[in-house]
Image: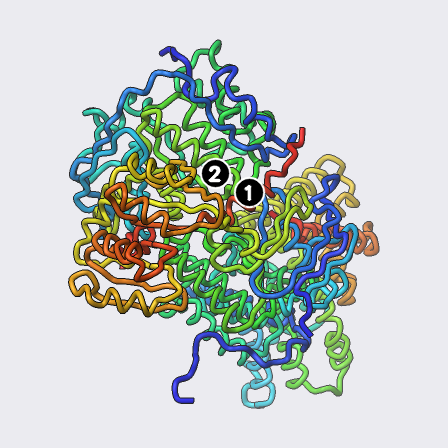
Amino acid sequence: MTRAGPTPAGGPGSDPAGAAGSAPGSGAARVPPPARAPAPARAPAALRVERVSRWYGDVIALNDVDLVFGPGVTGLLGPNGAGKSTLIRLLVGLARAGTGRVLLDGRPVRNDLESLSRIGYVSDADGLYDELTARRFLADQGRMRGFSRAELPRRVDEVLELVGLTDAADRRAGGFSKGMRQRLKLGQALIHEPDVLVLDEPLTGLDPMMRRDVIKVVRDMGDLGLTVVVSSHVLHEIEAMTDQVVLLRHGQVLAEGTVAKIRDHLDDQPRRIGFGTDDAAGLARALLLERELVLGLALEPERLIVHSMHPERLCQRVQELVLSGEVSVQRVDPLDEDLAAVFSYLVR
Amino acid sequence: MSQAVLQLEGVSVRYGKRLALDELTATVSGGAIGLLGPNGAGKSTLIKALLGLVPLAQGTARVLGADAARQPRRLRRIIGYMPERDAAFPQLTGFQATWYAGRLAGMPDADARRRAHEVLLFAGLEEARYRDVATYSTGMKQRVKLAQALVHDPDLLFLDEPTNGLDPKGREEMLGLIRTLVGDKGMHVILSSHLLRDVEQVCGSVIVLRGGKLVSQGAVDELRLSSDDACTVSVAGALPGFRAACEARGLSVEVARRGTVQLRFAGPVDASVVFAAAAEAGTHVSSLRPLRVSLEDAVLAAMEGSEERA
Amino acid sequence: MVVHDRSYSRWDGDKHAPVHGVSVILERGVSTSLASLFRRKLFVLLLSFAAFGPFLMALGVMYLHFFFSSNPELAPMTQSLEESGMLEHVTPNPDTVWGYLFEIQSWFGLVLCVLVGAGLIAEDRRTNALELYLSRPLRRADYVLGKLAVIGFFLAMVTLVPCMLLIVVHALLHGFGTSEAVVHTNLLWRTPLAAGVEILTASLLVLAASSLAQRARNAAILFIGGLAVVEGVIAGLLLEVFRDPAVQLASIHFNLGQVMAWILDNPAELHPDVPVLNSGLVLGGWLLLALMVILRRVRPVEVVA
């Protein structure tokens, strides 16, 4: 098996500035942002979960889950016990479905070397060998993935630079901080240039700088066309990585799609919009006449929160009121738009 | 007299040859304080030094008036510590573990029992408190750690990554508990976390460490300066018309993420101008927010340092 | 106030009263150990039977003898009992006490060390409880003493306590007007001392093993294995090779036996060629080593991430 073609990230001569952010020997380096080298986009990979159920004894972990993960980043969310870890294990072939199948471009993932060689996986468990150095560990992984001895050192160096472990490359993994271990795991998942990347809580233990860098790496991988599945509990970080999410609960898919679309589909839930104004009472008076638009009003010192089933028409109306000079509004704040709001409504 | 919660003067801590804290000097007053910094900056070391678990090579550290080096045990009576890693007393139920923790902190048996139940309920462990801690989920383990830190009613609470491993609902609940403690009960809290959103929601001020030194300190509101000449806007219709209308009114327009634009005014933001531009473009404003620097941006700058170390 | 705020309340207790760390750890340690012992009910039943068997038998024989001798009609029974030789075994004197403590009950002590002692520190390491202990107002010494007290308690229950009971019962049954009384009085302070040395030795050694491991099971293996190596291999081998009795100083068991014999004033068990002082020094050395290991493994730095 040969690895041909330029690598998508951190190829030779790309982005030296990012690498300058390393404190010597402490491993507290920033992950340098990968260069947007004109690399060929990846072969689009479709990871299909076909009516999968999985149980452990009486407990059902996944119940008739039917999903497709395509190119780009998809966030996997859900409360604890929703089945995210089980789904992830199934995606990378670590577990078998009770009923249904998991396919990568039509081929089953489980026990299929060709499929598995296209997948990179960062688990939330600790799968590192403490006695090996970072370099050695990645080299072993690379060997197992089929890199020849000639290509190996170059590829290992590339990956080390990509995850910001160049300075700590020859230190034993046992002495690494949690953040460094995470980065090493990320390196191990990327070394073979996978088409699919599955990340289970990849930001655990990382400090804010590295979180930002890893979020960027994930976004960039998605932009390059990789199929990336990221599971995390930190909703605003998922939002920073992608718009596409899958929400699991009790082993079932509760919602999938972009945050905005999911929000739009929650028909029975009125939206809340906060209008920042000095004269909340005045605005309230003006809006009370709009019986169709306004379901409820909440007055606060500096703003008026309006509950409405037709948020866009409401904004239109407010704009008209502002332009006619009747009211003065400095701020328009839809309160239920973000992932956190959608999540808490769905998982109530 | 309001005493400073934390008074550090020239505090240095060594691990072998390495200087984990480097002549750290800071004064922190009350409320909820965020302790931030990259990995290896010395946050855990600082907490451990204040608990008297590592000796100070230099300097003095005073916590609520007590000298950390001279009176470590007295300090530990009035400090509650919630560690980041999993830590539990083996083979005990949630209740027994908390009761035990209370007695180890010097509480009489009956008081420890009573309060153990109280704090476990506060932390949200109702039925589960009678089960062995080994059977707990991550969220429950976090709650028990919080209860153990609260049972002896400390004056100062150290929380090290309290929302680790919690799902979004659990995170909200934990932050809510912390806010209750700070707001209603007047407890001082030092919150060390990598999740700056959490810190933003809970803390009034932050101190930022880097390389064992203090690199930034301040009130959260001050650090998150909102520039009053810029705002983020989204409109219902197509952008190009809106852009043109804004530019015609002398605003500079920059396209940002998710279909929003950043508008910069020559002077302070005037919302009516934005509404007018939208009307002219045949659309309406869906959102209009002042451009606010998030704590993340403000603090990341401090954490990275203006100078890269070669 | 009609509706009470029951969320979080302040405690108005004394935050500066002394902390009785040792007794808290002792109590909790004993409760937890008993709870885990009694989970295996049949086994514990058999064990108790065995551990207290000799005690109960001795008690029985003593009482029977007393009963028979106070009843002139049962003179033949008294005689047969005295002739059977059982009496020698149950009469408290330096030799029998030494035998009871060192040769008989020591085995049950070992079993208790494995069942109770091995997990005392190892389990705390496994669940990272040390971080919780050390962030309380406890001294390191409190922690160690507390743990020693837990295993010490169990060991005392099978060695010192039954032994003292036998001595006291015998004294009560036979009175203090005889030469036996002198023996009794001596034994009353020698026995605790000798048992104390035995208990301290076993406790320190098993706690050292416990502090070196991360799980009770591993600590138990380390403890038994360590003892087997020292006693069987090293001491045994050295004895075979050098054939010099002094070499027995390498054995903890031997040294303990000597020291206890000396304390109990039982010259019969003292080895003619190996001075007790040497035994005492070597034993002391082992105990010091064990203590140093424990102290080193229970440091805040061990816990600092």
Is residue C59 visible to the viewer in this orientation of the structure? yes
Is residue C99 visible to the viewer in this orientation of the structure? no
Q: Quadrant of residue C179?
A: bottom right
Horizontally, is A64 left or right of A335 in the view?
left
Three-letter amino acid code of the residue under disc 2: Arg
Q: Is C126 located above or below residue B92 in the figure?
A: above
- Residue topped by disc 1: B300
Chain bearing tag 1 is: B
Residue C78 shows which numbered tag? none
> Label 2 vs label 1: CA separation?
9 Å
Chain bearing tag 2 is: A
- Residue topped by disc 2: A212
Residue under the image location 77 percent in, 65 percent down = C263
* A214 or A185: nearer the viewer: A214
Residue under the image location 59 percent in, 79 percent down = B108
Residue B262: x and y in percent read: 41, 41
